[in-house]
Image (tube, grey):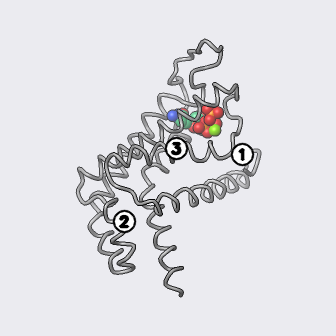
């Protein structure tokens, strides 16, 4: 295999691994969320809801807890992941080593940043949608897919230093993962539209 293709594959796989606390925070908010909305039903002066019924206490709390739990596991397994990367592709290993956590405490902190960042980013997306009078659940392409990524990466960059090419790879992969997940949900009859 062409070494540069191999490097892109490794970087992509690592991008998914790095973002697992954010992805799983988002997915568990969606799966286990519901009930009392975070904004408690309040509206702003524009007459629109602050966040809407799609942002709930249960989804928020469970999402952040899952992010923390995944981060803890990643902190514990971090040294082994780093060794594997250095064997597989030392250039990539060197490039992203500042984003790997090597202890349970570091991992938990990064998981908290990625998980809460994902949830906050998603809530900011809902806030913006409401201000533009977009109803809860109505699609806004790109923002719906990337709001949680932006939030997660901003908070994560307070904990670790993330190189630009990892950010680019994560944004592209997230768009594909999102589309893939929606197509599967559509085929399973869980969604009415494939996108
Ligand atoms: N969810 C939740 N709590 C959160 C985030 C998400 O309970 N903090 C759940 C809600 O049940 C929500 C679903 O996950 O309906 C999907 O989230 P999202 O697509 O962000 O919300 P939408 O319902 O599409 O609403 P919005 O228009 O505000 O994005
Ligand atoms: Mg939505």
- Mark 3 or 1, closer to the camera: 3
Mark 2, ligand 1, within 8 Å: the answer is: no
100 in relation to 150, above or below: below
Element assignment for label 2: helix
* Contact check, label 3 and label 1, Cβ < 8 Å: no
Categorize mark 2 by other alpha carbons within 10 Å: few (<14), some (14-19), many (20+): many
Marked residue nearer the N-terminal end (3 or 2): 2
x and y, in percent, of residue 60 in the image = 46, 34
x and y, in percent, of residue 11 in the image = 46, 69
Marks 3/2: CA–CA distance: 21 Å
20 in relation to 116, above or below: below
x and y, in percent, of residue 51 in the image = 57, 25
Mark 3, ligand 1, within 8 Å: the answer is: yes
- Of the four image quadrants, the one with ligand 1 is top right
- Mark 1 or 2, closer to the camera: 2
Marked residue nearer the N-terminal end (1 or 2): 2
Residue behind mark 1: 191
| Number of marks present in the image shown | 3
Q: Which mark is residue 148?
A: 3
Residue behind mark 2: 96
State the residue at coordinates (71%, 35%): 138
State the residue at coordinates (42%, 50%): 21
State the residue at coordinates (44%, 48%): 153
Marks 3/1: CA–CA distance: 20 Å
Element assignment for label 3: helix
Marked residue nearer the N-terminal end (3 or 1): 3
List the single residue furthest toward the front: 164
Q: Which of the 4 image quadrants contains residue 154?
A: top left
């Amino acid at each position: 295999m062409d070494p540069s293709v191999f490097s892109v594959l490794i970087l992509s796989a690592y991008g998914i691994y790095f973002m697992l606390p954010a992805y799983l925070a988002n997915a568990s908010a969606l799966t286990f969320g519901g009930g009392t909305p975070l904004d408690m039903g309040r509206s702003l002066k524009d007459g629109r809801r602050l966040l809407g019924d799609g942002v709930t206490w249960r989804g928020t709390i469970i999402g952040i807890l899952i992010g923390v739990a995944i981060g803890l596991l990643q902190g514990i397994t971090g040294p082994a992941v780093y060794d594997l990367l250095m064997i597989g592709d030392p250039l990539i290993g060197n490039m992203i080593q500042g984003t790997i956590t090597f202890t349970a405490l570091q991992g938990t902190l990064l998981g908290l940043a990625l998980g809460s960042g994902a949830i906050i980013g998603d809530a900011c997306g809902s806030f913006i949608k409401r201000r533009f009078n977009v109803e809860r659940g109505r699609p806004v392409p790109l923002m719906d897919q990337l709001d949680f990524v932006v939030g997660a990466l901003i908070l994560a960059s307070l904990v670790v230093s993330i190189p630009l090419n990892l950010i680019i790879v994560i944004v592209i992969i997230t768009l594909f993962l999102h589309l893939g997940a929606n197509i599967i949900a559509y085929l399973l009859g869980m969604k009415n539209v494939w996108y």
